[in-house]
Image (cartoon, helix red, strand yellow):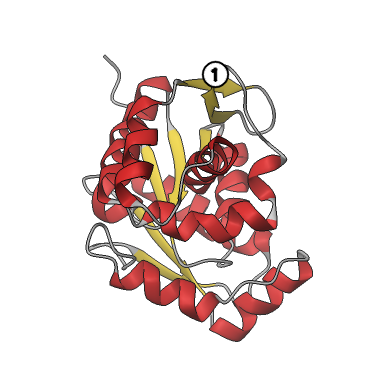
């Protein structure tokens, strides 16, 4: 079986992970995996099902029982999606209510175990660009292509506000960094990229160039 390449792009909220990973995947012809969307999908599922997101046992049970499947959506780039009962809630997972619930969902150890297994299974689908908060530390620590995007809190907050969202990023950063399972941190061997003064295209181009350099025989 072909050994598929995984490019791990981690970082805090509003560091540009998704947009950068999407552009890198498009440039290289890899599949794009938005792991944040996977957690958001579970958050949406819990909210619509009436699951108390503050009850770790209830959330873990919902994660164990929901019917999901991985699929590849055509586009530029092609994107791995997590379907629930055959449906991908593309708009629903971007609402304010879902965004507020994600941090609580992501703090549940059993949820992170399930997500880790599911995200690792994405590798069977092809070469990946996967973004998240623990890809290089927990999901694919063995990959040679690890990047950590970052920017000051003020810059990241302004990005969120431009998207029409209000979120306490300082509190989110603390929760992500302090959680006992797979906390947010820069992976060993990762390249830190401060993109506060870089455009999306410049950030993606840097990562592409670095990956291509390392892939050369």
Is residue 15 placed above or below 69 in the rendered structure? below
Q: Quadrant of residue 203?
A: bottom right
Is residue 118 placed above or below 212 in the rendered structure? above
Q: Is residue 197 visible?
A: no
Q: Is residue 207 visible?
A: yes
The image shows residue 159 at horizontal and vertical percentages of 69, 71
Q: Residue furthest top?
A: 1
For residue 76, side relative to residue 21 (left or right): right
Is residue 124 placed above or below 134 in the rendered structure? above
Q: Secondary structure at mark 1?
A: loop
For residue 215, side relative to residue 197 (left or right): left
Residue under the image location 68 percent in, 58 percent down: 96
The image shows residue 89 at horizontal and vertical percentages of 65, 33
- Packing grade of label 1 (10 A; few <14, some 14-19, many >=20) is few
For residue 82, side relative to residue 190 (left or right): right
Q: Quadrant of residue 202?
A: bottom right
Residue under the image location 38 percent in, 43 percent down: 59
Q: Count all numbered tags in the image, as a single digit.
A: 1
Residue under the image location 69 percent in, 27 percent down: 75
The image shows residue 199 at horizontal and vertical percentages of 68, 67
- Quadrant location of the C terminus? top left
Residue placed most toward the observer, 34 or 4: 34
- Quadrant location of the N terminus? top left
């Amino acid at each position: 079986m072909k050994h598929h390449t995984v490019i791990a792009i981690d970082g805090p909220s509003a560091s540009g992970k998704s947009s950068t990973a999407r552009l890198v995947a498009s440039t290289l012809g890899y599949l794009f995996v938005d792991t944040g969307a996977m957690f958001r999908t579970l958050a949406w599922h819990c909210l619509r099902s009436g699951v108390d997101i503050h009850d770790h046992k209830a959330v873990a049970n919902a994660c164990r029982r929901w019917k999901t499947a991985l699929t590849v959506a055509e586009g530029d780039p092609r994107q791995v999606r997590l379907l629930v009962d055959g449906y991908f809630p593309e708009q629903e997972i971007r609402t304010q209510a879902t965004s507020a619930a994600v941090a609580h969902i992501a703090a549940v150890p059993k949820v992170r175990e399930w997500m880790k297994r599911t995200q690792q299974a994405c590798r069977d689908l092809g070469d990946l660009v996967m973004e998240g908060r623990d890809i290089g530390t927990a999901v694919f620590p063995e990959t040679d292509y690890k990047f950590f995007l970052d920017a000051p809190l003020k810059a990241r907050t302004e990005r969120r506000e431009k998207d029409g969202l209000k979120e306490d990023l300082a509190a989110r950063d603390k929760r992500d960094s302090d959680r006992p399972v797979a906390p947010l941190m820069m992976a060993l061997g990762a390249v830190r990229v401060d993109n506060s003064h870089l455009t999306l295209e410049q950030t993606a181009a840097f990562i592409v160039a670095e990956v291509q350099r390392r892939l050369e025989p």
